[in-house]
Image (cartoon, rainbow, N blue to C red):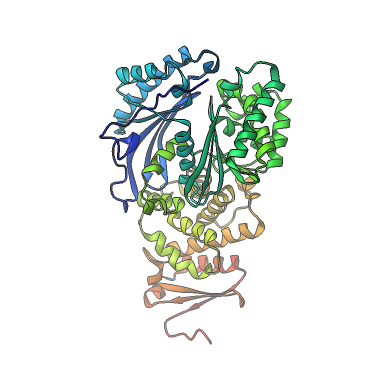
């Protein structure tokens, strides 16, 4: 079915800033984002997200989704689903009122495949404007692919490969690398579209295969990493977790080996989806589309031969934010930026995280960049849960690190960060309810997380504000010698608790701890 041109040209006031109509990042050096709301009117769902927090790694201040099914039956009738239109309109009215109450108005509203392809798309757009005051920015498939890819880059600055975003009526592909979006393509392989294919399973699978072969030839890709965006992919990933008894159910940056994905697709063919729906918390409407999405994913694997399948919870909505970010802001590390804002808003003494990191750096100087950023993030976050009851601070720290909305952090990284923060408040981890998660780390990684945690446990209480005023650490790994060189101030501060925590750190390093006072000879 040919697409009619429903893309709305921006008003003159909108030209510079696109759908937002205003600059979100007036000061490139600003680290915090003013509250901003985005609505994505898709073929299956209508979702509002209000962002707040770190400019480079926005937090979800509010998130609500309605599965309206706006594009259901579009391939057959050429029209938006009547019930879906009513539900979408009601949702948009509610979202508009919510945004006003949250100080997030005006909302930015983007509509995708269903609205742009439907014959009554312009009529629906006009109705939304008249009844809610919200202007729908209807984007074409190329723009949808670009914004979705930019959303992946917001969370994964180093991402390189192919973004594959599946919606209700279409599927978008885009190449990403070096922080940029390259060639992109939109194909009509959404589950709603596939429901209209006549001739049964074989005809449908032949169509999927044919469309993807053409797409593969145009994208010129084989054996690359695929970043999967969209609700149907996320449900399949959650089911993969269920089959594997995977211990961490955070979907963002969940990585599926291709073999595991194929095993899950085979498993789902004979599974009771109603039972799995209850076990995974999946809605009826979403689960209905899963078998068709499974058919598409199987052909994606067969045709594109991806090296790995990575799940991204970030998409179009986050891509709209990335669109406006100046290069200076894009270049920042999302993990460090989120940790920095958390420290500023939650720590007792904001600013001490960097000082703690500098104090502890001699222990980790030879570590690769990826590990150092985790160590820095841990130091920034080390005191952000101090309001929790002392008996539960260790667990709260771990939960925050492993389950928080943090970009630029894979699952082993989450567990490493959580375990380090657990040891910031607790010497012993044995018997912890969190032990199943530890299997995502190697024994060496577990040991290093413990060392980091005990180092923070010592350094954070050694002196108020800046531990460097009390002394410095000298670590000789070959000799297994850990020196603490005290200043005059440090001599008075190095009391019994500090002594015990320094000894615990030396034990974790399997080293001999030595304390040097002013005037002592380190060579003696």
Front-most of residues 173 and 427: 173
Front-most of residues 165 and 250: 165
- The residue at 50%/71% (across/down) is 362
Front-most of residues 281 and 41: 41
Front-most of residues 233 and 273: 233
111 is higher (above) or lower (below) than 407: above
- The residue at 48%/61% (across/down) is 456
- Can residue 414 be seen from the camera position used here? yes
- The residue at 46%/42% (across/down) is 150
- The residue at 65%/16% (across/down) is 198
- Can residue 347 be seen from the camera position used here? no
303 is higher (above) or lower (below) than 293: below
Snapshot quadrant of residue 357: bottom left
Q: Is residue 376 left or right of residue 341?
A: right
The spot of residue 68 in percent (x, y) is: 48, 20
Q: Residue furthest left?
A: 13
427 is higher (above) or lower (below) than 468: above
Marker count (numbered): 0
Snapshot quadrant of residue 38: top left
374 is higher (above) or lower (below) than 284: below
The spot of residue 287 in percent (x, y) is: 60, 24
The spot of residue 336 in percent (x, y) is: 44, 54
């Amino acid at each position: 079915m040919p697409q009619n041109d429903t893309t709305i040209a921006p008003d003159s006031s909108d030209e510079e800033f696109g759908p937002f109509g205003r600059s979100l990042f007036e000061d490139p050096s600003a680290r915090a984002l003013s509250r901003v709301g985005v609505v994505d009117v898709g073929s299956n769902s209508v979702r509002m997200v209000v962002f707040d927090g770190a400019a480079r790694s926005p937090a979800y201040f509010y998130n609500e989704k309605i599965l309206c099914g706006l594009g259901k039956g579009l391939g057959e009738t050429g029209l938006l689903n009547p019930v879906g239109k009513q539900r979408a309109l009601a949702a948009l009215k509610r979202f508009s009122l919510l945004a006003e109450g949250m100080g997030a108005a005006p909302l930015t509203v983007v509509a995708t495949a269903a609205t742009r392809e439907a014959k009554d798309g312009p009529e629906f757009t006009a109705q939304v404007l008249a009844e809610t005051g919200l202007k729908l920015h209807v984007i074409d498939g190329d723009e949808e692919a670009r914004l979705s890819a930019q959303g992946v880059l917001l969370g994964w600055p180093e991402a390189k490969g192919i973004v594959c975003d599946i919606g209700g009526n279409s599927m978008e592909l885009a190449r990403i690398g070096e922080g940029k979006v390259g060639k992109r393509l939109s194909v009509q392989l959404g589950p709603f579209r596939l429901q209209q294919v006549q001739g049964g399973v074989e005809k449908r699978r032949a169509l999927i295969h044919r469309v993807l072969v053409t797409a593969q030839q145009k994208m010129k890709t084989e054996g690359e990493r695929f970043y999967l965006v969209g609700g149907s992919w996320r449900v399949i990933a959650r089911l993969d977790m269920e089959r594997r008894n995977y211990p961490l159910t955070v979907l963002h940056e969940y990585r599926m080996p291709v073999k595991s994905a194929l095993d899950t697709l085979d498993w789902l063919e004979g599974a009771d989806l109603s039972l799995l729906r209850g076990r995974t918390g999946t809605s009826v409407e979403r689960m209905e589309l899963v078998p068709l999405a499974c058919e598409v994913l199987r052909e994606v694997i067969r045709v594109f031969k991806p090296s790995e399948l990575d799940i991204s919870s970030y998409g179009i909505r986050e891509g709209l934010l990335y669109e406006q970010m100046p290069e200076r802001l894009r270049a920042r590390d999302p993990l460090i930026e989120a940790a920095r804002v958390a420290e500023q808003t939650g720590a007792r003494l904001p600013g001490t995280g960097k000082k703690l990191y500098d104090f502890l750096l001699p222990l980790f100087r030879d570590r690769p960049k990826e590990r150092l950023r985790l160590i820095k993030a841990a130091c920034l976050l080390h005191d952000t849960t101090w309001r929790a009851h002392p008996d539960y601070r260790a667990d709260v720290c771990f939960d925050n690190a492993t389950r928080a909305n943090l970009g630029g952090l894979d699952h082993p990284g989450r567990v490493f960060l959580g375990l380090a923060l657990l040891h910031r408040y607790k010497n012993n981890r044995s018997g912890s309810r969190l032990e199943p998660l530890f299997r995502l780390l190697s024994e060496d990684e577990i040991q290093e997380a413990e060392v980091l945690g005990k180092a923070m446990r010592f350094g954070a209480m050694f002196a108020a504000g800046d531990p460097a005023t009390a002394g410095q650490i000298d670590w000789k790994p070959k000799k297994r010698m850990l020196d603490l060189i005290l200043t005059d101030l440090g001599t008075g501060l190095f009391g019994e608790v500090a002594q015990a925590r320094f000894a615990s750190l030396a034990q974790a390093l399997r080293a001999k701890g030595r304390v040097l006072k002013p005037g002592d000879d380190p060579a003696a």
